């Protein structure tokens, strides 16, 4: 029996400026917000002959990493004395056990720090399982039987939208063609879009230059941040549309800045630019507001989900026809299993999944879910793309590779979530503070 | 200038059994669940001549108290170097500042540990403000002008259901009669109901005895836990109805055990017992499921909200006609200010507020909100009652007093949230662990 007792957690903060003197203040991000790419990072190190480890993390902006790590400890306490082989052999059972611990659930059911802590632990176990299988996670998942995949999900609170039988039907329908789609993916990769040109912090010149760059790089779509200054948004969208031409998909992202009426008015003023979607118009848990906005701005679709706390929020966004695209996030919910529930819910509604991946390690992690979706769930790549931002990849053992505007299908075993040991050491918060002479 | 730097936090756990030997395992609660009444407790101690302190807490079951306290530290860091007088003089501005810190919001917007940490800090500030005013919180709030009360709320994400002007109208309408209602409250108190008879862990004999006791004590309603064994629920409701007679309000509480179809079927099998309401049928954030259940079981109303993460969830439950009663909780959301938003939303929808108060200190804290609602918001006590459970009151400086089935209006200055220093010391987790020889 190999127990999972041995694990390390690290507060990793990728300070993106050389200014971290004194009490470190993260620099402003391109949108002018005070954020820093960070991770509450977990490595599970079972004492087994193969020496393989499992890695998972919660992406954050730094603040709160210490209590996110404490929550990961609380989740690890539930499995630390269990046999790793049995945990890995029954990932559905493992997930349900973690999700149904009454005392952890009490803190904030299906939401927040506890939910993301479960996600880090579950993702680390999947990383370990995939490494042991010698397969990238997307391939490991894509080769499971429909029954096995259905068993990964807890259908509690989902059955009014998706029953286990309906999930099985979706997966059974996708069995024919799995091999062809896997081969296509290996040969051609998966489409990517970029949010890089559109940050509010950029000048018009930078916007124009980065739009040209996005076209040259072969991205299939760009996204422009809006919602602070309408006149400026109009000017910027005019520039982007001018550079990209009339048929190129341009989406906007409102960063949750609006109430319903604001959203309807603002989008109305921008609709002449032929918007591919509107991301995050309002509160991420406001299903009814999203539905009201969607109805008012039709046919422009809403894309959201990156901050939906759980599959229960995703379910409602889909049930109420609030979203035209689902943006899953690899570390916002309770891990691979919960995101599989999200993929199945989206497939049931016929809504394309276009993952969120703006943050350290998010491209590396979430690409596996989009590729699994293509091979074994929705069976389609049409009108789908994974977000890509060109930052922080150098810290990962198996960095995401985008070429010609497409994600190359990962071939290395694992879930993509392992950081380089030297990066973890160099950017651990304790090291950074010590270097600054604060500690 | 008096700064708020000085504060203490304590992990308080009221172990309700003498068995806390070894690694302490909390005892099963009456429902057979592994829980213990606990609090992440905060005392703000400004260095001022009056020596007054402000106290707040997050009620919990123990697990996670350490990261709840770490989150309270992170929130305190936002105000620790600010002048206490200015924070107290502008409680609306203080609340918005805490709620809009972009990095804390990033962790899990409007939900979870961060939300409840803000609640503990805000409630401690209100406790201090009320003590300085020499008034119980309900009276302090009830004597504020409608404009001042509106300014306590952040209307972001609320305006599709409630605008500042609409809130002002509600409050203006309640100005006439404030003095009469205050006098009535001081003379007659506020109705209480009890959940004590109905815990699943009790035998039929205990249930029967406690129903008789509830009648003898003058409670206006009881609540029975259901949802595990339908045959047993039927037997227990028959006993309760038999003891209480045909006209006495009996509610049921499903503890979030059901999906939509389960709820409809189960309530259908119990409706012959004339159910006053159904509490927590399903996931606390599943607005659409609550709406679907409510429609199917009409005219039996749903009561929920005690685990709604924020005013945004409460707003949606009301907008979708999902609930007939709103059960606010004193420590689940971001404090008094967010609960004032909840009271205004409920008043706008004409839905009575019947606060949740099952847990250490929750009666003491939430009674102030119900009484403020009666005097200055809804202006009504009709079809309303505050939950009461007869536990843990001895640990509070100003314990809630229920006589003849009614809460007596508190007269002591403060928000009711201060624990006795000797209780904090005796039940601090560190002391308990030390007593057990574990540390």
Image (cartoon, coloured by chain):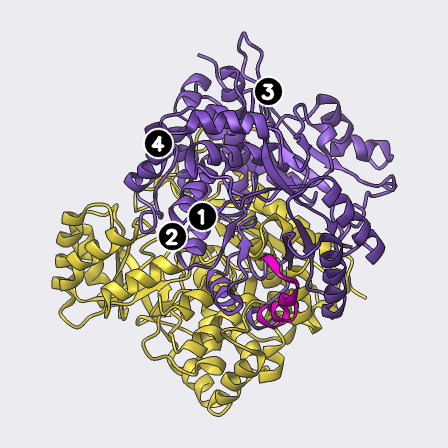
Chain colours: A purple, B yellow
Proximity of marks 1 and 2: CB atoms separated by less than 8 Å: yes
| Marks 3 and 1 on same chain | yes
Circle 1 residue: A109
Reading the chain from its start, which is encountered first: label 4 or label 1? 1
Where residue A151 is drawn, which disc sits there? 4
Q: CA distance from mark 2 to mark 4?
A: 21 Å
Q: In this rendering, does residue B399 appear at all?
A: no
At which x and y percent is residue A411? 58, 21
- Judging from the image, mark 1 belongs to the subunit labelled A
| Marks 2 and 4 on same chain | no
- Judging from the image, mark 4 belongs to the subunit labelled A
Q: CA distance from mark 4 to mark 1?
A: 22 Å
To which quarter of the image does residue B439 belong? top right
Q: Residue furthest bottom?
A: B176
Circle 3 residue: A412
To which quarter of the image does residue B215 belong? bottom left
Reading the chain from its start, which is encountered first: label 3 or label 4? 4
């Amino acid at each position: 029996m190999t127990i999972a007792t041995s694990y390390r957690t690290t507060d990793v903060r990728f300070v993106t400026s050389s200014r971290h003197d004194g009490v470190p203040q993260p620099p402003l991000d391109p949108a002018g917000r005070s954020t820093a790419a960070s991770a509450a990072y977990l490595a599970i190190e079972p004492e087994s002959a193969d020496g393989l480890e499992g890695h998972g993390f919660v992406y954050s902006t730094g603040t709160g990493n210490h209590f996110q790590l404490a929550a990961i400890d609380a989740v690890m306490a539930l499995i630390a004395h269990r046999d790793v082989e049995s945990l890995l052999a029954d990932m559905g059972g493992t997930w349900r056990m973690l999700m149904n611990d009454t005392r952890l659930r009490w803190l904030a059911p299906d939401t927040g720090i506890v939910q993301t802590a479960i996600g880090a632990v579950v993702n680390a176990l999947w990383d370990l399982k995939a490494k042991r299988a010698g397969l990238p996670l997307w391939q490991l998942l894509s080769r499971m039987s429909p029954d096995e995949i259905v068993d990964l999900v807890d259908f509690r609170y989902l059955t009014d939208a998706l029953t286990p039988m309906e999930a099985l039907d979706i997966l059974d329908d996708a069995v024919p063609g799995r091999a062809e789609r896997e081969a296509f993916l290996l040969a051609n990769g998966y489409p990517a879009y970029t949010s890089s040109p559109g940050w509010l912090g950029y000048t018009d010149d930078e916007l124009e230059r980065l739009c040209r760059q996005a076209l040259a790089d072969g991205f299939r779509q760009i996204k422009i941040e809006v919602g602070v200054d309408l006149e400026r948004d109009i000017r910027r969208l005019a520039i982007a549309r001018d550079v990209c031409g009339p048929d190129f998909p341009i989406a906007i992202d409102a960063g949750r800045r609006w109430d319903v009426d604001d959203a309807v008015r603002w989008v109305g003023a921008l609709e002449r630019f032929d918007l591919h979607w509107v991301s995050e118009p309002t509160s991420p848990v406001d299903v009814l507001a999203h539905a009201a906005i969607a109805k008012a701005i039709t046919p422009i679709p809403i894309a959201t989900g990156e901050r939906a706390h759980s599959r229960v929020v995703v379910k409602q966004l889909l049930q109420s026809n609030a979203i035209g695209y689902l943006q899953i996030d690899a570390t916002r919910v309770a891990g691979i299993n919960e995101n599989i529930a999200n993929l199945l819910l989206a497939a049931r509604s016929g809504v394309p999944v276009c993952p969120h991946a703006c943050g350290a390690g998010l491209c590396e992690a979430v690409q596996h879910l989009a590729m699994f979706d293509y091979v074994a769930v929705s069976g389609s790549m049409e009108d789908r793309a994974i977000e890509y931002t060109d930052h922080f990849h150098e810290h990962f053992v198996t960095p995401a590779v985008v070429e010609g505007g497409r994600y190359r299908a990962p071939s290395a075993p694992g879930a993509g979530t392992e950081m380089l040991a030297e990066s973890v050491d160099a950017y651990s918060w304790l090291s950074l503070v010590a270097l600054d002479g604060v500690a």
